[in-house]
Amino acid sequence: MRIGELARRAGVSERALRYYEEQGLLTPERRPSGYRVYREEDVAAVRRIKVLLAAGLSTAQIVTVLPCIVDDDGLLKPDCPELVDGLLAQRRRIDTAIGDLEATRANLDAIITGA
């Protein structure tokens, strides 16, 4: 399938697909004309990429994580035991960021109320 069809089916822009390719997340076949040709399984791969991005992983992290993620009836699960430790570290990083933001908000509230 061509890039426009994949973009439509996966719910992303063509620009996003080009970016995913630049980052090594997708490797479409190239025709002599330069057109990208995607496989049916790329639709599912893009959907997994979207979920991982929404979970706070960077594209560099996703490159290493993606081969170890399986889709179990719409639910993504790690398929490599070592992946869980990395995901737990990512969750701890997010928890720390949330705590920092909550402290920042409390400081701002104190300034706003003058308390």
Image: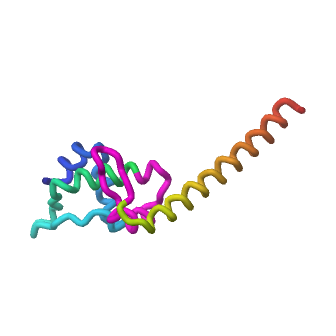
Residue positioned 30% across, 51% down in the render? 71
Determine which quarter of the picture holds residue 42: bottom left
Residue 83 position within the rendered picture, expressed as x and y whole percent measured from the top left: 44, 65
Question: Residue most toward the top?
Answer: 113
Q: Position of residue 29 (x, y in %)?
A: 16, 66
Horizontally, residue 28 falls left or right of residue 12, namely left
For the view shown, which residue lies furthest in the front direction? Answer: 81
Q: With 104 as the anchor, is 76 left or right in this view?
A: left
Q: Name the image quarter holding residue 90.
A: bottom right
Residue toward you, 78 or 3? 78
Instruction: Depth check: give the residue in front, 99 or 28.
Output: 99
Question: For the point 37% across and 50% down, which residue is it?
Answer: 50
Please check the rendered image and state whether residue 94 is part of the magenta-colored stretch, yes or no.
Answer: no
Quadrant in the picture for the C terminus: top right
| Side of 91 where 101 appears, left or right | right
Where, by quadrant of the figure, is residue 78 drawn? Answer: bottom left
Q: Which residues are magenta?
A: 52-78
**Depth order, front residue of 109/44:** 44
Work out which residue is located at the far left of the displayed protein and give it: 32
- Residue 22 locus on image (x, y percent): 33, 66
Q: Report the label total.
A: 0
By what rule are the colours in the image chosen?
rainbow
Q: Residue at the spot x=30%, y=44% of the render?
A: 74
Where 11 falls versus 78 (above or below)? Answer: above
Q: Give coordinates of residue 54: x percent, y percent.
A: 45, 48
State the residue lying farthest toward the right: 115
Say whether residue 90 is left or right of residue 82. right
Q: Is residue 76 magenta-colored? A: yes
